Every structure is written in C-alpha cells, then in structure tokens.
Amino acid sequence: MNLQPASTEIANRAAAIVEDLKDIEGPLLPILHEIQEEFGHVPQEALPAIASGLNISRAEVYGVVSFYHDYRKQPAGRYVLKLCQAEACQSMGSDAVAAHLKRALGIDFHQTTADGAVTLEPVYCLGLCACSPAALLDDEVIGRIDADTVDEIVSAVRS
Ligand code: FES
C-alpha cells in the first residue's frame, strides 16, 4: 500500500498516543481527546491505529467519534465560535441568537463555513450565566451576545 507521507505521519503519531494511553481505565475517550488535541480533529487516518491498539473494530471507534459531537471528523475553521445553549442562556434568548448566527454564517451547529473561516459549536454552560447569553470565540469571552454582536463577529471572522 502506498500511503501519502501525511497519512503515515498521522498514523504514526496516533499510534504513539494509543501506546501511551491504552493501559489506562477506559482508554478510548482519553485517546480520542488527545488525538483531537494533537490534530485539531480526529483524522480518518488515526482510526486504524486506535482500533488495533485497543483491539476493537474501526467501526466501533468511528461510532464513538460520531456519537460525541465534541470530536470533530474534519479540521475546524480558523475560528471556533461556541454559543451557550444551556438553560440560563436559553432563558435570555440564546435560541434567537443561534438562529441569527446560523443564518448569517449559512451553517448549522457542528459545521464549518465553506471558506474555512469559522466552526460553530454549541456548549452547555460556560460559567458565564450572569452574562447570558454567552459565547466564546476561540479564547475570547463574549457576554450578552445579541444580533448586533453576531453581525460584528461574522464580519470580523470573515475579514
Ligand atoms: S448557561 Fe450559558 S453560561 Fe451558564
């Protein structure tokens, strides 16, 4: 088989992570977490190394990656925008903010804009309930997000 160097590199790095963590209790989630930390998502090329290292099928690994939305199957955009959808933020209108944001970006939660600018993700309480509705743009906290803030964010991430 003639793998691209990038694929081989990913497989090798994934295998090293699996080797480090495979003996801990319940290793699959920590391994996936570490792989996402390393690559920014869980690449397809990492799945065989995980499956063989843990002696489970690729389908099982893929099932877990698909089940947990925190694991990305594709690389994230240049920015990751997380909008809180938990109760306190919902009571302050985060649903309407989400709808406006999705319309403005043309994507749904867990998707990335076609230009690769931004990935939109829901989160469930950022500990900023006093500033509901709250969001996080990469590491920047955004409190009391509303339609105007959304428009500013969208033009900032697209510029
Ligand atoms: S519920 Fe949104 S920050 Fe706590």
Image: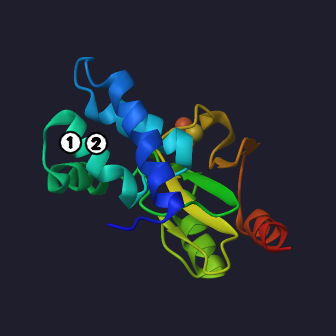
Residue 43 is left or right of residue 76, and the answer is left
Residue that sits furthest to the top in the current view: 24
Q: Is residue 27 above or below residue 129?
A: above
The image quadrant of residue 131 is top right
Q: Is residue 129 above or below residue 68?
A: above
Quadrant in the picture for the C terminus = bottom right
Residue 146 % position (x, y): 71, 62
Say if residue 95 shows up in the picture: yes
**Dots 2 and 1: beta carbons under 8 Å?**
yes
Q: Name the residue rendered at 61%, 74% in the picture.
A: 100
Q: Name the residue rendered at 31%, 35% in the picture.
A: 29
Q: Is mark 2 within 8 Å of ligand 1?
A: no
Determine crowd level at label 2: few under 14, some 14-19, many 20+ residues with C-alpha closer than 10 A: many
Residue 134 % position (x, y): 64, 47
Mark 2: which secondary structure?
helix
On the image, numbered disc 1 is attached to which residue? 52
* Near-viewer residue (22 or 105): 22
Residue 22 % position (x, y): 28, 25
Residue 94 is left or right of residue 72, and the answer is right
Mark identifier at residue 38: none
Mark identifier at residue 50: 2
* Near-viewer residue (97 or 118): 118
- Quarter of the displayed picture in which ligand 1 can be seen: top right
The image quadrant of residue 132 is top right
Amino acid type of the residue that numbered disc 2 sits on in the rendered structure? Ile
Q: CA distance from mark 2 to mark 1?
A: 6 Å
